[in-house]
Image (cartoon, rainbow, N blue to C red):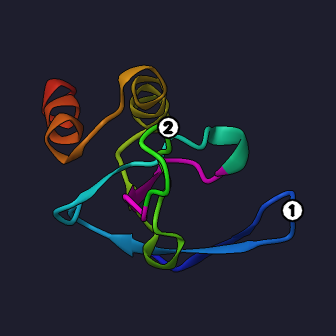
Amino acid sequence: MHVIKDTNRYGRVDTFEPVTQIPTGYSVWNIGRHNFPHERCVPLAKEGKKQYDWQMPVDLSSLKYIMVDTEKLALRILKEAGYKGVDRERFYEIINENK
């Protein structure tokens, strides 16, 4: 696995470090496959500082990604993250359901 550097549509470069286990405090970052087009890779982030209660910011200085067995599984995880979020515990539940 290697570091992934992605440039978003506004020119910001995001750096994602690879991990083999999701660190405590991280969850799946629901940015969609179109914004993170790396097969079998799931983007991870920890919560950033909020100015308002309704915000859901991430800490862009500590992004990570984890690779899963198949792209189908990665897409399932990303889809669920879009509906209700996927924290560390739920990520491993999904992984174990697919064994």
69 left or right, relative to 24 = right
| Residue ID for mark 2 | 71
Task: Give the residue type at disc 2.
Answer: Glu
Counting the numbered discs, the total is 2
| Residue ID for mark 1 | 10
**Would you say residue 78 sits in the magenta stretch?**
no
What residue appears at the point 36 percent right and 48 percent down from the top-left corner? 68
Up the image or down, 41 lies above or below 82; here it is below
Q: Quadrant of residue 9?
A: bottom right
Tell me how far mark 1 sits from mark 2, CA to CA.
27 Å
Upstream in the sequence, badge 1 or badge 2?
A: 1
Q: Which residues are magenta?
A: 36-49
Task: Give the residue type at disc 1.
Answer: Tyr
Q: Secondary structure at mark 1?
A: loop
Q: Position of residue 77 (x, y in %)?
A: 39, 32
Q: Secondary structure at mark 2?
A: helix
Q: Nearer the viewer, mark 1 or mark 2?
A: 1
Q: Which quadrant does the N terminus fall into?
A: bottom left
What residue appears at the point 51 percent right and 40 percent down from the top-left corner? 30
Q: Position of residue 20 (x, y in %)?
A: 25, 67
What residue appears at the point 53 percent right and 70 percent down from the top-left corner? 60
